[in-house]
Image: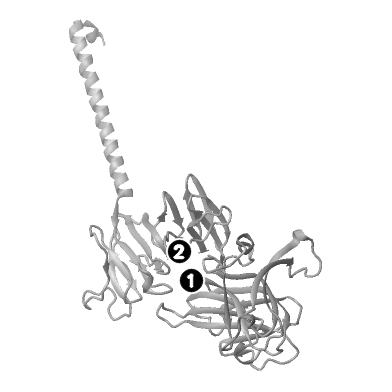
Amino acid sequence: MAQIANLPPEQVYYQRVAWTWMLAFFGLFCVLVAFGGYSGWRYYTTATTPVEGAILRSHVNAGVSIQPRGRLTAESIERLPPERDPCPGERDICATVAEGSVIRTKAEAGYGPVASLVLADQTQIDFWAHPDGAELMLASYRATTWHNGRLEVVLRQNAGYLRYDIASGQPYDQVEYIVEVGDGTRVRLDPGGSYSINVLNSAARPLPALAVTGKPLRIEVATRSGRVVIDHRGESVEVHPGQLAQIDAVGTLAGPSEARWELIRDGGFEHYLAQNRYDQTSKTWRKYAVPNAPGMTPSEHNGRFAVVRSCRPETPDFCTPDDQTSIGQFRRDGSQTRPFTVGIEQTIDADVSEFPSLRLTMWVRVLTQTVQLAGVAGSECPVMVRITYKPTSPTDQELHRYFCIYTGSGEVSNSEDAGEIRYRQVPQFQWYRLNVELRDDSLLRQARYIQSIRIEARGHDYLSEVTAISLVGRQ
């Protein structure tokens, strides 16, 4: 220090500048070394590479296409030669799928799962086609490059119904499956769970409405097992097994609630009272009438349907006006000698292949039936319910299951389960609750598609009533 103190001021100044620069460069060197080490560590821990091995398996011969990244149009997948076929010798038509590919299905592909995307980790995504097709992009499918730290999958579902079965027991410390739906909505799926997402965007048919707002539905997310987290407009909602969350067209998020789907609209006839009619333009029930004998006069075409207000079936004898409900009534009188049918029908148009439970319920009451027995092929049924369905494909022939509810002291001339008709003999004047699990029915056990429902009165003179009509599907 004495030596420095004895140096000329100019030399002291230059020495201090030199030390300052040396310390600055040393500090910069330390920063660069630390930054390089951190960058290397971060690259090692976060760098990802695309995971190969995703296979699209089409279970049908037409209606499934794939559009690889960079292509302007989609191409139908076709069976490849054995040496290039990802699944040679199998019934499915297979194609490899890379990041950025878009998979589409069309309605003509049929009912039920028409294709499956099987990822390398054995996660399976099933595609439905009815009613307006489905569309999914494999936006990103990546795993960490140098270790098994993380698997990231981002999918973008633009339309239709898809089922996601996320594989469990994967060799990664973290697994993240994200499905982007709508405008900024992200659905996070836990590994080991089974989920379904439906994106409704049809312009050709009326969409069901969200119960709490009355607005058309846009997105439905249901959980069979596992857990879903929906991130939507700054809020997060968890959906657990047996639950359903819904988003309407204006962005309202509702739920979670019980995962159940009511397939019949206006089962309590409230819309009839609002419109004071059911005609061919109705979006719920439509009225119809059919003469059952040739040469019937206009005066014999006197079967009619109306909606009245009366006591609920649970309290049929005593109720206040505020406790009354809407009841559909079929009526024909005048001591008729030839039969006539009057009824209501509704188009359901639903792929029900995901529903292991399909429960049909309604309250029915027969007040008048002049011909006591149900007759041959249900010709004297004051309440006849007809379900029209198809087994597997849009090209299948329409099939029917009938339920005939009748009254009288005689015995039915047919067995309990006679061909297409199942009979129920009920006490006259008393309400009876029809409660049928359609998946236990011999004809409807495997049906994938319900087309319509009819409820009618057949016969000579009759007075019968129905209310609280419901057809509920559960996954």
From what the image shows, is residue 347 above or below residue 276? below
Relative side of 234 to 81, left or right: right
Disc nearest the viewer among 1 and 2:
2
> Please, what secondary structure does the residue beneath circle 1 have?
strand
Which amino acid type is marked by label 2?
Answer: Arg
- Residue situated in front as seen by the camera: 393 or 274: 274
Which residue shows up at 75% across the image and 58% down it?
322
Which class describes the residues within 10 Å of circle 1: few (<14), some (14-19), or many (20+)?
Answer: some
In the image, farthest residue toward the bottom: 413
The mark that comes first in sequence, 1 or 2, is: 2
- Quadrant where the image shows the N terminus: top left
Cβ atoms at labels 1 and 2 below 8 Å apart: yes
Which amino acid type is marked by label 1?
Answer: Asp
In terms of image quadrants, where is residue 90? bottom left
Q: Can residue 53 be seen in this view?
A: no
- Residue situated in front as seen by the camera: 385 or 272: 272
For label 1, the residue is 349
Alpha carbon distance from label 1 to label 2: 10 Å
Residue 296 image point, x, y percent: 60, 86
Residue 445 image point, x, y percent: 53, 81
In terms of image quadrants, where is residue 120? bottom left
Which mark is drawn over residue 98?
none
Which residue shows up at 21% across the image and 76% down it?
83
Q: Can residue 415 be seen in this view?
A: yes
Which class describes the residues within 10 Å of circle 2: few (<14), some (14-19), or many (20+)?
Answer: few
Which residue shows up at 33% across the image and 59% down it?
138
> Please, what secondary structure does the residue beneath circle 2 have?
loop
From what the image shows, is residue 265 above or below residue 293? above
From what the image shows, is residue 221 above or below residue 471? above
Relative side of 125 to 411, left or right: left
Residue 258 image point, x, y percent: 59, 62
For label 2, the residue is 205
